[in-house]
Image (spheres, grey):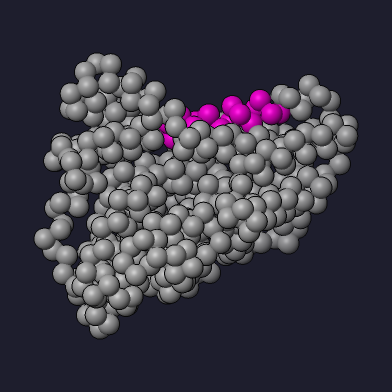
Amino acid sequence: METMGFISVIPAIIAIVLSFATKNTVVALAIACIAGTLLAGQGPMGFPTLLKESLGTTSFAWVMLLNTFIGILVAYFQKTGAIQGFSQKVHERNLSRRGAQLMAWVLGMFIYFSDSFSPLFVGSVMRSITDKAKVSREKLAYIADSTSAPVSVLMPITGWAAYLMGLAVGVGCITTDKEASALFLKAIPFNFYPIFAVAFVGLLASGIVKDFGPMKKAEKRAMEEGKVLRDGANPLIGKELTEMEAYEGIKPRVFLNFIMPVLMIVSIALGTYIALSSAKTMEAFLFVIIFMTVSMLIQGIPFKEVMNTMTDGVKGAIPAVMLLALAYSVNALSSQMGTAGYIINLTEGFLKPHLLPAIIFLVSAVMAFATGSSWGTFAICMPIALPLAFSFTGNTLTTLVIASFAAVAGGGVFGDHCSPLSDTTVLSSTGAAADHIDHVKTQLPYALVCGGLALVAYLIVGYVFV
C-alpha cells in the first residue's frame, strides 16, 4: 500500500491540534490543507487544485445538498411556526432537564435511517426545549451525535448496513448478498462501541451516570448561570436560522407543517430502501421542500416571503458547508498521501488471532479519527481485516470473523465520532447550534469511555472465543 510515511499524518495532526488551539476549525483545516499540499510536493497551486478535485465529487455534492435542503426545511418549520408550536406543546408539559434529554435521546434513535439528517433534525427540534430546561448546547450536540452514526451502523435497513455488507461479499466464504446480510446480523451483538455509546447517552440523560469532565462544567454553567453556550462561543449555524420568527398571523399547524413532512421523509427513505435497496434521502427532502413551498403559499404566506425564507435557509447552512468542504479536502489529501496505508503498515506485525478483533478496532478508530471518515475507513480496513480473520479460521465463518467484521464497523464509528474532521460531528454542532470545538471537547471523554469498554470487550472475545 503506497504511502508517504509519517509525513502522511502531518496534515491531520495540524488540523486537530490547531482546531483545539485556535478554536477556529475553518482556519485550522485551511492551514492543514495548505501545509499538506506543500509537503506532498504539489507547490503553491496544490491547495486550489485540492479544493477543485475533492469538492467536485458526488460524495461532497450529496452531503452539501442534503445539508442545504435541511437548512431550508428548518427555515420552513420556523417560518410556519411549526417548531415553535411543537416546542410550545412540549413546554406545556414542563419537561425537566432529565425529560428533555431523554426526549432528545429517543428522537435521535427514531430517526436512524440517515446519520446526516438525524443530528440536524434532533438539534433543530430540541434546541428551544433543552434551552428552556437549561441543558447546555454541548450536551444536546453530544446526544444528537451519539444517536446518529452509532444507531445507523446497528440497523440492518440503512445505507451503512448495505455498504458494510457490500464490502464483505466475495471475501472468504461470503459469496452472496444473503450471506453478507447474515454476517451483518450476527455481528450486531459484537458491535460493542455503538451499543455502548447509545446506552451511555441514556444513562447520562436519565441521571444514572453523572456528567464528568468538560461536559460537567458546561452543564453546571447552563444550570447555574442559564448560559447554554459559553461566553465567546461561535455556534456552527447562521443567525438566519437561530433568530428566525414565524410569519405574522399564521396559525401554527404542527401536524401539517412539521409532523407530516417528517413522516413523509421517513416513509420515502424507508420505502425506496425496501423497493430499490437504496434509501433516497436527498430526493425525499427535495420532495418535501416542494410540498411545503406549495403548502405555505396555500396557507397565505406571500411568494416573496417564502423565497426569502428559502434563501435564509441556504444562508444558515453555509457555516457547516464551509467546514465540510475543508474537512473533505483534508480527507482527500490523506488519501493521496497514503495516511491509511501508513497506519496499517505500523500495526500489521501485531495482528495475532487472539488480539485480532481488538487491534482491528484500534486501527479502524485511529484511521477514522485521523481522516474524519468512517466509510473511508471501512473501505480500507474491511478488505484487510476479513481476509486476515478467514486466514486464521481456515476460510470458515467463526466468532473471530464475525467479531473482526464488527470491530471494523465499531472502530470506524468510534474514530469518526471523536474526530473534529467528521461530517457527522460537524452536523451535530450545526443542529444544536453549538460551538464545534466545545462539542468535540465535551464529547471526547464520553466517547473514550465507551471506546475503552469496547476494546476490553474485544480482548475478552479474542481470548475466550478464539
Q: Quadrant of the N terminus?
A: top left
Please indicate whether residue 116 sits to the left or right of residue 275 in the image. left
Decide if residue 361 is in sight here: yes
Q: Is residue 417 inside the magenta stretch? A: no
Point 34% across, 19% down: residue:
48
Q: Residue at x 26, y 52 (%)?
A: 366
Q: Which residue appears farthest toward the bottom when viewing the image? A: 464
Q: Residue at x 46, y 47 (%)?
A: 424
Q: Is residue 288 left or right of residue 270?
A: right
Give above or below for 229 relative to 146. above
On-image quarter of the C terminus = bottom left
Q: Is residue 317 magenta?
A: yes
Residue 82 occupies quadrant: top right
The reply to whether residue 456 is in sight is no
Going by the picture, which residue comes out furthest to the top? Answer: 44
Residue 316 appears at what percent x and percent y? 58, 31
Task: Reply above or below: 127 against 347.
Answer: above
Tell me residue 60's x, y (percent): 46, 35
Question: The magenta stretch spans which residues?
Answer: 309-325
Quadrant hosting residue 36: top left
Q: Nearer the viewer, residue 99 or 182?
A: 182
**Vertical side of 200 occupied by 302: above or below:** above
Residue 417 on image: x %, y %:
39, 53
x 44%, y 61%: residue:
165
Residue 454 lies left or right of residue 325; in this view the side is: left
